Image (cartoon, rainbow, N blue to C red):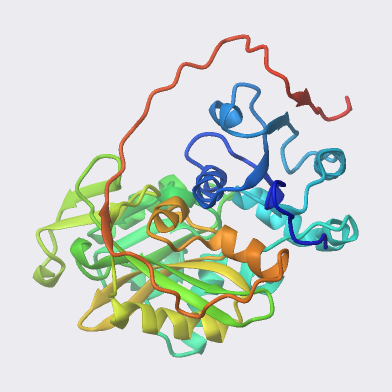
Amino acid sequence: MSEPAVPGSPRATAMITAIGGVSVGEQILKALRIAGGYRIVGVDMAEQCVNFEHVDEAFVVPCAADPAYLEALLTIAEACGVQVLFPGSEAELKFLSDHRAEVAEAGILLPIAPREVIEIGMDKLRTAAFLDDHRFAHPRFARISRDVIDEVDWYPVVVKPAVGGGGSMDCYIAQTPRELECLAELMTDGATEMMVQEYVGRPDAEFTVGVLHDLDGQFVNSIAIRRELHSVLNVRLRVPNRTSRSDLGPTLVLSSGFSQGSVGGFEEVRTQCEAVAAALGVRGPVNIQCRLVDGVVQIFEINPRYSGTTSLRAMVGYNEPDAMVRRHLLGEVLTMRAPYRTSRIHRSLMETIVPSSPARPWTVTRAAAS
């Protein structure tokens, strides 16, 4: 680890991967800019990445599945004096989790969750099994099969990929056995394992909750955002409730990965999610997706990474990436449960022209020809 920054120098040099589009990488980038004082090295697969204009140095790298990916990252990191590395996509998070030793050998801080936490969180069936084993409330669930379709009697249900599926990708609602059968036939192609999960709660009681521990396992803080699921940007799917479950409300809604809403105390929600994170053995960030039903948090996903609301949290004074740098790179003592502002935050689209042939001062790192 390097020494703390001296006056007039950057607080730290941070590399962020997958900074393009509306990714988690972009959220981390925004959070570090809000914190201020960082020299940021941004990398992405796309040569026309819009956020290359918002970093100090920009590089094009191969995808995480490419054999040249790790060499590209470490070469850039050495050339730029990178001190801390933030993976901005789930594919890169998984890859770098598997290559922690090489990153550490290069003297780079990698502030991510433990490997076991990542493996549980990235597999929704394992997530549900963990919650079940530890007696935390969660929707009923099952791996999709012919027998399961015949046995499900807890409609409506959500059909989703068991692995991946960020931003509610490939998630659907079935309200009858026939709908579930059709979705199972459509979605189960042998390549992607699918699961069925009970639809619980009302859309106005859905929360995204961040729980942060330092890399030594010491609890730092938590935050909850009550989602507002009204706009096309924030809703993946909206259908009329045609079941007899009036307790679910007139409309069934699946949120997208673009959350907005109210940051508040929500102590009832945060306390229950903190208990889950502690049982999971979290070190670093974790993000819990849930609905509050009769005072009980029903958890339907655990994302073992920085959140799609990282910048929203930073806007109110809860800056997870910056906290990890200050704690583990700069040696600061973090204040447990440091206060942050309560606010209502809305998101909107912003258009940017990207030149078709941009002439920009970044180095292009490509995979060797096979």
Q: Is residue 281 left or right of residue 295?
A: right
Q: Is residue 336 at all visible to an observer of this figure? A: yes
Name the quadrant of the C terminus.
top right
Q: Position of residue 40 (x, y in %)?
A: 66, 41
Name the quadrant of the N terminus.
bottom right
Q: Position of residue 209 (x, y in %)?
A: 40, 68
Q: Position of residue 161 (x, y in %)?
A: 49, 55
Up the image or down, 267 lies above or below 10; here it is below
Up the image or down, 132 lies above or below 237; here it is below
Task: Using the rendered view, name the quadrant where residue 328 is placed.
Answer: bottom right
Q: Is residue 305 at all visible to an observer of this figure? A: no
Q: Residue at x 38, y 83 (%)?
A: 272
Give 180 or 352, whichever is nearer the viewer: 352
Q: Residue at x 83, y 56 (%)?
A: 103
Task: Using the rendered view, name the quadrant where residue 300 is placed.
Answer: bottom left
Q: Residue at x 30, y 40 (%)?
A: 233
Q: Residue at x 41, y 51 (%)?
A: 168
Q: Position of residue 333 (x, y in %)?
A: 62, 76
Q: Is residue 21 left or right of residue 370?
A: left
